[in-house]
Structures are given as C-alpha cells and as structure tokens.
Amino acid sequence: MSLKSVKDELGSFHTRHKISRQLHAASIVAIANEVAEGRLTIKSFREGRLIAVIKTPVERYLIESQVPEIIAAINTRLGEPLIKTIKFRFESYE
C-alpha cells in the first residue's frame, strides 16, 4: 500500500468547492483586521472590495478620512494591490 499526498487524494476537490478562493478571502480579512487595529471590523472580501461593519454614522464619518491609509497598509502587507475600496455596512442589532 503506497501513501499518496493529500493533493493527490483530493484531486480537484478544492477547486470544485471553491475552497482556495474562500481561504484566500479569509486570510485577506484577517490581515485587514490586524492592520485596521480596531478602527473598524472587516467582515468580508470580494473582487477588490472589503466590507466593514460599523455601529453608527458617526463612526463612518470618523474613519472615512483614514480609509486610503488603511487600504495602502493592507495592500503593503499583502504584497499586492488587492484592495480597491472599503464599503461600510451598519451593524444589525437583531
């Protein structure tokens, strides 16, 4: 009985189920949250856009001027310009 690598065993499982794209997005979200240092909370990444959750319009106003700096810091940390914009969503209280 020979041992096979996980890659050989799974074949194209990861591409069929879009796992690698999801893992990549999850790592971008983790890095973005580290860089943001609590100034905002990133919830998702898709096609160059981060979605940040905020509680009030005042928070958005206060963070808006820092967005270019945050994007630049995230892209520097990632090593490539993946982030183009940050969109804000209000936190639901449900």
Image: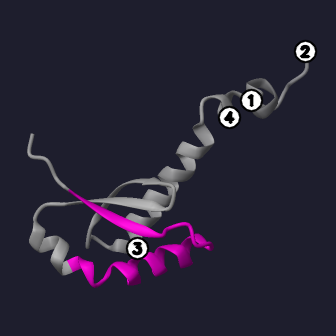
Q: Tell me the SS state at disc 4.
A: helix
Residue 19, located in which quarter of the rendered image? top right
Give the Cα distance between marks 1 and 4: 5 Å
Q: For numbered disc 1, what is the local secondary structure?
A: loop
Is residue 88 one of those drawn in magenta? yes
Tell me, yes or no, whether the highlighted magenta stretch contains residue 86: yes
Q: Residue 73 versus residue 84: which sits nearer the camera?
A: 84
In the rendered structure, which disc, 2 or 4, sits on the residue that comes first in sequence?
A: 2
| Viewer-nearest residue: 32 or 2 | 32
Q: What's the mark number on residue 1?
A: 2
The nearer-to-camera label among 3 and 4 is 4
Residue at mark 2 to residue at mark 4: CA–CA distance: 27 Å
Residue lying at 56% horizontally and 66% vertically, measured from the top left: 82
What number is the disc on residue 15?
Answer: 4
Q: Are marks 1 and 4 in contact (CB under 8 Å)?
A: yes
Graded by Cα atoms within 10 Å as few (under 14), some (14 to 19) or many (20 or more), the crowding at tag 3 reads some
Mark 3 and mark 2: Cα distance apart in space: 48 Å
Give percent across and percent down for residue 75.
Answer: 53, 74
- Residues under numbered marks 3 and 4 in contact, where contact means CB atoms less than 8 Å apart: no
Give the image's coloring scheme. Answer: one colour
Picture disc at residue 35: 3
Structural distance between the alpha carbons of marks 1 and 3? 33 Å
Quadrant location, the N terminus: top right
Which element type, helix, strand or loop, lies under badge 3?
helix
The image's mark for residue 12 is: 1
Magenta span covers which residues?
A: 63-89
